[in-house]
Image (cartoon, coloured by chain):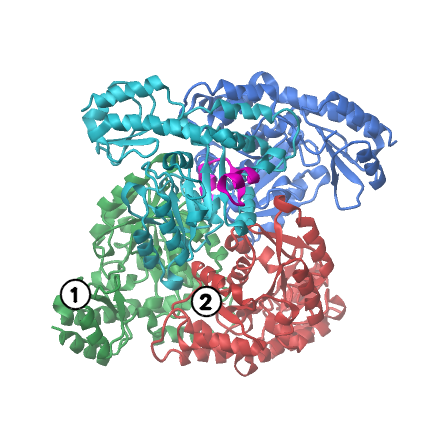
Chain colours: A red, B green, C blue, D cyan
Amino acid sequence: MNFRSDNTAPAAPEILAALSAVNEAPAAPYGEDPWSRKLDEAFSTLFEREVRVFTVASGTAANSIALASCVPPWGAIICHEEAHIACDECGAPEFYTDGAKLVLVEGDAAKLTPERVTEAVARNARGIHSVQPAAISVSQATERGALYTPAELSALGQVAKAHQLAFHVDGARFANAVAALKCSPADLTWRAGVDMLSFGATKNGALAAEAIVCFDLDRAEEIARRRKRGGHLLCKGRFAAAQLLAYLEGGLWLKLATQANDMARVLGEAAGPFLSLPVQTNQVFIKPGVEALAKLRAGGADFYDWGPPGSGEARLVVSWSQRPEDVEAMRVLLASLR
Amino acid sequence: MNFRSDNTAPAAPEILAALSAVNEAPAAPYGEDPWSRKLDEAFSTLFEREVRVFTVASGTAANSIALASCVPPWGAIICHEEAHIACDECGAPEFYTDGAKLVLVEGDAAKLTPERVTEAVARNARGIHSVQPAAISVSQATERGALYTPAELSALGQVAKAHQLAFHVDGARFANAVAALKCSPADLTWRAGVDMLSFGATKNGALAAEAIVCFDLDRAEEIARRRKRGGHLLCKGRFAAAQLLAYLEGGLWLKLATQANDMARVLGEAAGPFLSLPVQTNQVFIKPGVEALAKLRAGGADFYDWGPPGSGEARLVVSWSQRPEDVEAMRVLLASLR
Amino acid sequence: MNFRSDNTAPAAPEILAALSAVNEAPAAPYGEDPWSRKLDEAFSTLFEREVRVFTVASGTAANSIALASCVPPWGAIICHEEAHIACDECGAPEFYTDGAKLVLVEGDAAKLTPERVTEAVARNARGIHSVQPAAISVSQATERGALYTPAELSALGQVAKAHQLAFHVDGARFANAVAALKCSPADLTWRAGVDMLSFGATKNGALAAEAIVCFDLDRAEEIARRRKRGGHLLCKGRFAAAQLLAYLEGGLWLKLATQANDMARVLGEAAGPFLSLPVQTNQVFIKPGVEALAKLRAGGADFYDWGPPGSGEARLVVSWSQRPEDVEAMRVLLASLR
Amino acid sequence: MNFRSDNTAPAAPEILAALSAVNEAPAAPYGEDPWSRKLDEAFSTLFEREVRVFTVASGTAANSIALASCVPPWGAIICHEEAHIACDECGAPEFYTDGAKLVLVEGDAAKLTPERVTEAVARNARGIHSVQPAAISVSQATERGALYTPAELSALGQVAKAHQLAFHVDGARFANAVAALKCSPADLTWRAGVDMLSFGATKNGALAAEAIVCFDLDRAEEIARRRKRGGHLLCKGRFAAAQLLAYLEGGLWLKLATQANDMARVLGEAAGPFLSLPVQTNQVFIKPGVEALAKLRAGGADFYDWGPPGSGEARLVVSWSQRPEDVEAMRVLLASLR
């Protein structure tokens, strides 16, 4: 019963099959193949407006290249102190931006609020001596599995606009968010003022396919250049494109995310009083104490502790591919703690 | 009859099959899976000594990360003026190295010679005001399809050692080189003084799998860090590892490269007097004049012109996947020019 | 009565005179002149061991180049959240280091403690995904005018050593610290484990002369290269060297700093209950409330508010050049608040 | 008789005196002092239009920050293969631009021609795979002491405009050029299409004062930010400003440059048939052979050899401060070679 991360999941069969389908003949390299050329259209349809899409090999690359394309080296990127870009990318955003600064703010459930952002802007807007606030970056769903509603995003979008900040969304688990919120991808992005989205597929069924979805078309050329210089323009780009097309085809992405979210909810209900946060997507945070966690592990569960050593908190991540019998066994284990 | 580039080829069936084989169950992320863990061993066996291997998504990433790991920002990388790192990577080496300088030298068939390198070192070793010669980078096979013999590489390796330069090989077509030279990969690398090899697989049968093979083990940690920051540490690393393992398995890599080289030789013989260079690997450079090239295109051939506009030169690249009937048709077309 | 900052002070007459003295004849450029050549010796004498000294044009340059020479791009620099390098250099350390990360910690009087540093190391040492703790940077005196004793520095030095961190001191006001602590510069630096010191002179009597004092001789070549690339190797380096030599000559630096510290103490005594922090060097932090600050200004005092708007706190900085009558007038004004 | 470089010269008395004049009282820091505030106006008058001026500590900083402010990281800067930015700045332009590429072209007397530039643009404009031509940089006077006429600069300016390239002039010896050409600074810069000028004063009488003169006002904010991050925004900026104001005052800059040029012409006439290039400014290139150079040195002359070892060529640089008796002695020595 492995609930360590959704990145341990295999690839969805539909996506693996798509690789074979595009492999039948030679095709033009570097994004000039028919599949890569379909990407802009497919995502424009999905987002109900014209967008430009750039595939990259990892979420770290998507986040870093997107941010570098809307933040000058002397810019500040305001994000949550638990954000993936701040804690888990070994400084990749600083590398790609040539040394921009991540300004970290606190917030429940790893969420930013307009108040915190406004305060961070004020604190960092002291002319030439401080960095220049240049972007907001939020994760949707957050590192704590929480969601921003369209209204919450719009409020952040207004703060961004008021202070001339770019607005970036790290959507490593965007599918889980859309599936849970049951709203339009457009409402969670450009309609709320979002300029750039890191659209994740790898955690939810792809082999290795992430995309930068660019709503600010003036930035597209810069993204293309930065992607190339990062080594993320693939000569056989069709294999990345095919994964993304299959991922969207027939709503597969939402089907897989819904599976994961539903199973996580089951675990959340079982954990009941031990939940540290409400379960909104496919991550379950529990805080039953150190001994209880040991008991879960003794029962065959595998997962990461969370927070500082000895906190007695843990994270369970449920992927689309989780076996129902494992989820049921975990449910029983969790229920036994009560 | 598409002879534009070997990067238009599909993936080899064996490699595609390997993806399915590793997809049956969850696996640890970020290179901790069983397949990724086998890579060091598989390449250590291949190279007859301990090596460390790092998969990345493109040859540009392999070259740039390898170079950044052995050259300081104030270093000079001595390479041929037609080198891929100099002409085709949009400045990625400069980006990853934080601004090292590529010092370009001339040479027949896109090859470096010890004399040219020595001269370039002397020209750039003027203390604090000039950059500091820090590495040699050669392509094997070169951008003109030519080969360095083990003796030639050793001579360059000695120059490198004498001037404390790192020695990097861009092996985007390393398989074609090894297949043609019929010598040990060790003889073409560390035995000749090579510190880092960009080991390509994508052009010769993989979907997207390149590797940095690191012979200077002290540099491994730095490569790991730079790979992460470049966004090239994949969470589902097993899919990249599986491609490389299948590529090596049973000598598939040499089988595919030999196929390509053999077909190129056939075209080279047909081109006869119009060859601009002897055919050593899977690239055929011909210079029959502008009108003859038009005639080839009228006959159904697709390829890139080479050199400045109006030069009447062209490049034909033969991949492992070329259909025999296409090669035969091309042979006839070429022969008809004489 | 201008107490805004010691950087508004003129240059000391002795230092200005030194410029004329070195101007009598041509001299070798780029640090090969007799005065530049004396610097290493003069500072080695001062610090009671062999050091290497590099002049630069600003404290920002000194800090950034020093840090870049002991921290890899993927490194973390642990510093106080109010540190000059974090708040007042527009991201220069990130620029020079190619994107290293400043990890901010809290602490009274802008001071780091071993406990906070240890905790920050633990929080950021999570393998390849997090940046790698690589340096501690402290300001002596701090941004709040406070001091580290030799024992406190040694304790930090031990933490640094235990975790293989470089140890950097931002000594923009190092003279004020040495003058106040009345101890050996050696005790405040290398004897406590310090590897690099940004030695400031500009705030305390020079025109524009800061120096990187390098105790880790292996790093000297890297500093030289980074200085050159930053544009801080001056062709007429003797003018910077002459300022520093005059600054040290006959203990001028300590004489000027003592003057400033003494006058600050007078103001601190006058401020009495309104002091937010004890006065240790030449900075006086008072918190008499918004109205009282308005009263001071109405009385002719010029200074910066401190902290968030409306905090009622202010900073008075006393330079060596403050006129006694201004200090007396300020003393009377402060006393009138009680 | 030291003819090594004009950077060995002392500072002009007028400029040294200006330092004392601004030192009488405290002044606002970071360019807010009265002298710094006068700079824009003084240079706007000089250039007959509105400009923005930024002082920095070295020509390397001026060139690098100017270029970084008009070239993206993926840009190419077209310059002469002997350009100071290419050969003598240890890669500073690459550092400040985050890895832009210098594309080197040949040309007599270290000069660029429209033809060479056009050819370099064509060679490097191959879409996403190559860097993007983004700027032309020329030196006025060149590294060989040669001059661009206003007409020549305009022709380059038109090429720049046609290809959307920024146009930068390295004016380390701009004074010598203006003095020799006897034309308006405006004609040699913005009227010819120049966007950025590195305006040198250090080689011609200042202690350490260079300025970026920015004609493209939209770039000013970026220059300010990059200057700060490079550590070149000085807290006591008035000392740099005062040097520049004194340099311009009453045409001092042209008086000093004329002195140097005139003395160089005398040496050039003496060298007669041994001149490798006509003497246009304050540099004299002679090629009398190895033995003749030894003879000059035996006669007491000090200078640098030029070109590859054994070339028998040398460079004599004449500064404003050269003693007439030294010039006369050198004249006699040179004449004796004939």
What residue is shown with label 1? B275
Look at discs 1 and 2 and give the one toward the viewer: 1
Q: Amino acid at mark 2?
A: Arg
- The residue segment tinted magenta is D40-64
SS state under label 2: helix
Question: Where's residue B117, x and y in %?
Answer: 26, 45
Q: Are marks 1 and 2 on the same chain?
A: yes
Q: Is residue D315 found inside the magenta-colored segment of the image?
A: no
Residue B126, disc: none
On screen, B185 above or below C174? below
Against B119, residue A229 (above or below) is below
Q: Position of residue D256 (x, y in %)?
A: 42, 28
Camera-nearest residue between A246 and C293: C293
Question: How crowded is the residue under tag 1: few (<14 C-alpha within 10 Å), some, or many (20+)?
Answer: some
First in sequence, mark 1 or 2: give its number: 2
Does residue D43 show up magenta in the picture?
A: yes
Percent coordinates x, y for residue C12 in the rendering: 61, 22
Whether residue C286 sits left or right of residue C228 in the image: it is: right
The answer to whether residue C7 of the structure is visible from this angle is: yes
Q: Position of residue C139 (x, y in %)?
A: 63, 35
Q: As shown in the figure, which amino acid type bears the numbered disc 1?
A: Leu
Identify the image quadrant of residue D19: top right
Q: Which residue is mark 2?
A: B238
Which residue is located at x 70 percent, y 24 percent? C322
Residue located at (14% from left, 72% from top): B270
* Numbered circles on residues, count: 2
Q: State which chain disc 2 sits on.
A: B
Q: Nearer the viewer, residue B19 or C35?
A: C35
Res A298 seen here: no
Q: Quadrant of residue C200?
A: top right
